[in-house]
Amino acid sequence: MKSVAMAYYNGAKYIDEQIRSILANMEDTDELIISVDDASDGSETILQNWAQNDPRIRIIKGPGKGVVKNFENAFRHCRGDIIFLSDQDDVWKKNKMIKIQQAFEDPKVMAVVHDAQIVDEKLSSLNETTFEWRDSKAGFWKNMKKNSYIGCCMAVRRSALKRILPIPDNIWIHDQWIGLLAEQLGKVVFIEEPLIYYRRHGGNVTELTHGSIISMIKKRYHMIMEINRRVKEWSEHDKQNQRHIEKP
């Protein structure tokens, strides 16, 4: 079973096209979890119609605390062994799930990232891919400096999420957090093939520009500190479990 986790916020304009492209990738046993922070743009009816007509879709109420916590809420409702992250405004290519599943056949792989064709709101190519834009490749310090982990291009193993969640409140971006921790847990695979159309428009949460230098330094500082804290927690937890096992 595979799950798709979508964080939703007033996405009426593109959601039909996105849901249709996701369902075309899914098997009957898969699920699409849509965590809805707000659908006051008229999209509540759209979402409910989809859910009523396809049992693979589950609509859940979001926490209303921003995109990171909305994704975390979606993750917690997913039941699949592999969890695909999804935005509300892109379009998946039909071979996306199959290609990513193949990468997870290696049990050491904790997360997968694929390339994406950057397009405008009408799906016309902007002649660049996300891998070209972000110089995408694995590596902790590479991705701390310039993040390759774009959520809508990612999938993560459920067992990894058990260690990645909860996401600390001072972490501003869920995908970089997931990717960097996945590197600590095992392998991350980068697939060079564009598997979605990555739509850019005025309402995107992730922009193609950077914040101020001070803002970037603070965000990286919090990321490093929280990752170090989480890895230390894993180590302590594993040691306690080992002592419990060895106890006569």
Image (cartoon, rainbow, N blue to C red):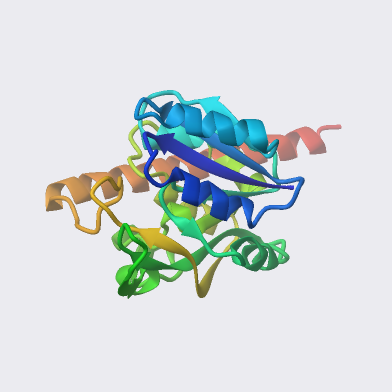
Along the line of sight, the residue nearer the viewer: 127 or 154: 127
The residue sitting at 30% across, 48% down in the picture is 204
Residue 167 shows up from this direction: no
Residue 49: image location, x then y, percent = 57, 32
Q: Is residue 33 above or below residue 121?
A: above
Residue 158 placement: quadrant: top right
Point 44% across, 23% down: residue: 63
**Foreground pick, 76 / 110:** 76
| Residue at (64% x, 30% y) in the render | 52
Determine the image quadrant of residue 13.
top left
Q: Nearer the viewer, residue 197 or 210?
A: 197
**Image height of 239 relative to 59, above or below:** below
User: Above or below — where is 34 with respect to 213?
Assistant: above
Residue 122: image location, x then y, percent: 33, 60
Quarter of the picture containing the C terminus is top right
Q: Left or right: 88 with respect to 188? A: left
The residue positioned 23% from the left and 49% from the top of the image is: 202
Task: Tell me where residue 31 appears, x and y as whole percent.
Answer: 67, 42
Q: Quadrant of residue 161?
A: top right
Q: Position of residue 86 (x, y in %)?
A: 49, 49
Q: Is residue 36 left or right of residue 202?
A: right
